[in-house]
Amino acid sequence: MRVLIVGASLAGFRTVQSLRALGSDAQITMIGDEIHLPYDRPPLSKAVLLGKVETPELALATPEELVDLDVDLRTGVEAVDLSVAERTVTMRDGSNLSADSVVIATGARARNLAGTEHLSNVYVLRSLDDALAIRDAMSRARRLVVIGSGFIGSEVASVGCDLGLEVTVIEAMSTPMARVLGPRIGGLLGSFHGEAGSDLLCGVTVASFVADHGVAHAVELADGRSIAGDIFVVGVGSLPNTEWLQGSGIDIADGVLCDDRGRVIGAGGVYAAGDVARWMVPGQGAPIRTEHWTAAGEEAAVIAANIVGAESVPNSVPYVWSDQFGHRIQVIGRPGPQHDVHLLSDRSSGVAALTGVDGVVTGAVVVDQPKMFGKLRRLVVGAAPWIDAVAAYP
């Protein structure tokens, strides 16, 4: 059996590990467009920017471990086309690779602001090279402007504060994370910015950049204000890397459309995992792209089981965390901006909140309370009745 994994991402690497753990002796080839060996991304916006972690420490496996996995890893190789019927991938250099099973794990890229491509001090953060470039720029900067206050933007702002920079964060919504967690919880998380010295401006958008000779000096806001900076980091979401699949016939609207086992719809023998994949999730109605570190590994395990014909277990409840401004934020489940919110504790003792819809608990957001997180996690995993959960934690 031949397995071709397109994307040397966490999802791609975990697929290799899962196949070997299941006893597969398949001939596995994994290609990736970056020159680096597979590496861990969560530290990029935290420890790497702070200089606490260097490139070798990010590796998901040592060269010796890769040898033990018996995988033909090809870095710096970009896929440009997929023939579904032949399960053949064409590379930028014109070469082809065919397999019995193809796993799409090309991840996602950071969304940028139009018109900033030529500005040398406007960055996005997605890759190791991005993080190293931002770290170098921060070492020479005094003023940092972050556009977007999601997890990435807030983590970058947190690092800026730790490094003693003047930090301004520009957020289009009324609070951080409002699109995901709603304004009530987002407002609580937003308070961390001011306490750490980050100037958070909400409900405003960027109209343009003031630049000279390819270097930005300020952003002009839609309300007329101008915010000066030496370095600008854009954190406004991501886009799945699916352009190379445009001629394949696969549904790639906001990610590769899959069933609840990672099998690409309408493409036998082709699977997708990680940030590029849009899986059907029971109880959610529409397929969802779950861009979490934990989900990538779980999806890879499900796909590996399908490839070898073993029994697979569907994905567990999503989990994500963020370390920022001296706090650990943990989110379990699928909270929604319009969901009901039951606040168990506020800033005085660490934030803890449950979310629910249609009488069922859908998620929990907990800050700096690991024991409480464990308790609320059980309610989320068990899809506890909302009325019972609220009564248990008045």
Image (spheres, rainbow, N blue to C red):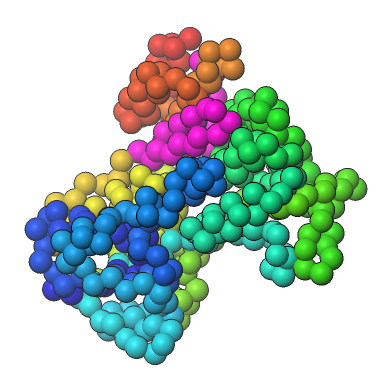
**Is residue 250 visible from the viewing direction of this image?**
no
Outermost residue, right direction? Answer: 224
Instruction: Name the one closer to the observer, 347 or 50.
Output: 50
* Residue 117 within the magenta-colored segment of the rendering: no
Q: Main secondary structure of the magenta part?
A: strand
In this view, 391 is above or below 129: above
Q: Residue 328, percent across and down?
A: 48, 29
Q: Residue at x 31, y 54 (%)?
A: 60
- Give the side of residue 119 with respect to residue 340, left or right: right
Instruction: Name the one closer to the observer, 160 or 218.
Output: 160
Q: Residue 337, percent across and down?
A: 58, 36
- Give the side of residue 20 with respect to residue 358, left or right: left
* Residue 330 within the magenta-colored segment of the rendering: yes
Could you tell me which quadrant the N terminus lies in?
Answer: bottom left
Outermost residue, bottom direction? Answer: 94
From which residue to which does the magenta span run?
317-344
In this view, 104 is above or below 351: below
Instruction: Name the one closer to the observer, 145 or 281.
Output: 145
Q: Quadrant of residue 200?
A: top right
Q: Residue at x 82, y 69 (%)?
A: 213
Q: Residue 296, percent across and down?
A: 35, 52
Q: Quadrant of residue 183?
A: top right
Instruction: Name the one closer to the observer, 233 or 251.
Output: 233
In this view, 1 is above or below 158: below
Q: Quadrant of residue 8?
A: bottom left
Q: Residue at x 54, y 24 (%)?
A: 341
**Is residue 230 visible from the viewing direction of this image?**
yes
- Give the side of residue 358 with respect to residue 176, left or right: left
Q: Residue at x 70, y 60 (%)?
A: 121
Q: Residue 276, percent across and down?
A: 43, 61
Outermost residue, front direction? Answer: 140
